[in-house]
Amino acid sequence: MPTDRPAPAGLDPEVCYRAASSRDGRFDGMFFTAVHSTGIYCRPSCPARTPAYRNVSFHPSAASAQRAGFRACKRCLPDAVPGSPGWDVAADVAGRAMRLIGDGVVDREGVEGLAAALGYTPRHLTRLLNAELGAGPLALARARRARTARVLLETTDLPVTDVAFAAGFSSVRQFHATVREVYAATPGELRGRGRARGARPDEAGAGGPRGDGVVEPLRLRVAVRTPYAAPELLGFLDAHLVPGVEVVHGATYARTLRLPHGDAVLAVDLSPVPGGPGAVAEVPLRVWLTDLRDTTAALERVRRLLDADADPVASDAHLADAPVVGDLVHATPGLRVPGAVDGAEVAARAVIGQQVSLAGARTVAGRMVATHGRELPAGLRGVVPGLTHLFPDPAALAALDPEELPMPRARGRALVALGTALATGEVRLDRGAERAAARAALLALPGIGPWTADYVAMRALGDPDVFLPTDVGVRRVLLARGHPAVVPTEVEAAWRPWRSSALLHLWNTLMPPVHAGQEGP
């Protein structure tokens, strides 16, 4: 076997070939196999016969394989996998860029907007992404648009023109050309293949706003690696939900959200997810959009909320033998760290919840939403019972009078200062923000301490290595389990780099079961 073959972004071709030969699904999304004799690229677990080593090369992203002229395999659908867990947890520029590209920043603001958000020139950012991911920002955005278009074609009855613009394409002609190049099929043929595989369109209709103002749901899906502890994630979200903004009906979590082009409502089915270690499963969701151009942003934000790109096999294997939490990991494999659809909202809710119980924080936040939140537009009212308002945005928070808020004045002043910092851009909490800088900026605000800053870093910025040693719930769990209330330094070090997962395993013992038997929306 030759050993001098170049490997993009540090990929070892021999290691990649062994992984592809094993058809181990744990490597799906981490790299892609390009087969030179057929001109296609596959995920590592593709069931087709493994080609000879001399006929393959390996790519760190689907965009890299597409840029090299390969089309997606019709059998294994290599783009229907979670993103690389390396990109998901990385705090480097490439990881931050991938998260912003997934949110549609390139579609809305171009490469210049992406570069400005990351603090680089477009030329330097393109060079960096080519070196790390094998493709520049335009190619990465194009691959993301193609993936979104395929999902919409397979799972909705949206007209092809609507699919094109919902996926982020600037023209129908560009959409047709990209689909033909990436999938070797027309959009109609791609839709037919999806139906042949059993994909079904949303029973409610094509989806999106109708001419009479009614908004119909799009039925979509988010790929996740298994095991995936969906009921436990639902329990966390249920315990923290804010009335009017979030609701749980049976196994469905639903909420309102503010997107770049308009408001929306989403409903995620968090029923148990089947699949053994290393498999890929799909979490179904419905989203009601007032503007179909927000489809990509909605999907990306759901991915953040569900911690969809995490690698549970790696984190569970590390923590299963770790002190204090090992038995919890064995009891609940695949536990995820809940993310956020809006970093500013998470930060505001963290400030509201300082030094009060979960129930108290929910009550105060619900009052604020009812008084200062914006009501849903007419087309979204009633699509999910219990959802009535959007959480106040930073500008609304900045305009509040601390003296009139239902909380201690010091905390009210901290909330207003946070809203001002977010509204002016002094603090950035999107997934493209640099974590250390965002944490430092939060700590510089009056009334915000390490617990709040670290909680925000974990949920809003996706930091996988956060622990909250002063958290009352953590101390209560530790004492109940016969451990010291303060985790020894050496124990906390043994949890790295997945301290956030260890924290969730401790918190999970406090989460009451979600009440079943209610009808979903």
Image (cartoon, helix red, strand yellow):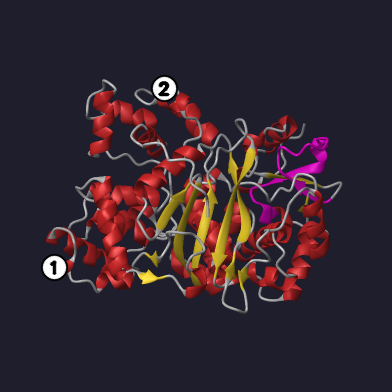
Image height of 50 relative to 66, above or below:
above
| Label 2 element class | helix
Write the start and end of the magenta stretch as one range. 39-64
- 50 drawn magenta: yes
- 216 drawn magenta: no
Q: For residue 295, which quarter of the picture?
A: bottom right
Residue 37's x, y, as percent? Answer: 86, 46
Residue 226's x, y, as percent? Answer: 58, 36
Identify which amino acid the numbered label 1 is placed on: Glu
Image height of 31 relative to 3, above or below:
below
Q: For residue 35, which quarter of the picture?
A: top right
In space, the residues marked 2 and 1 are separated at their CA atoms by 47 Å
Image height of 320 relative to 61, above or below:
above
Q: Residue at x 27, y 47 (%)?
A: 359
Residue picked out by circle 2: 327
- Which circle's residue, 2 or 1, is located before the other in the chain? 2
- Counting every numbered tag in the picture gives 2
State left or right for residue 369 relative to residue 229: left
Q: Residue at x 58, y 63 (%)?
A: 296
> Camera-side residue: 133 or 499?
499
Residue 478's x, y, as percent? Answer: 27, 27
Instruction: Look at the image and tell me whether residue 114 can be seen.
Output: yes
Marks 2 and 1 in Cβ contact (< 8 Å): no
Sort mark 2 into few (<14), some (14-19) or many (20+) by Cα contacts within 10 Å: some
Identify which amino acid the numbered label 2 is placed on: Asp
Residue picked out by circle 1: 403
Residue 130's x, y, as percent? Answer: 61, 58
| Label 1 element class | helix
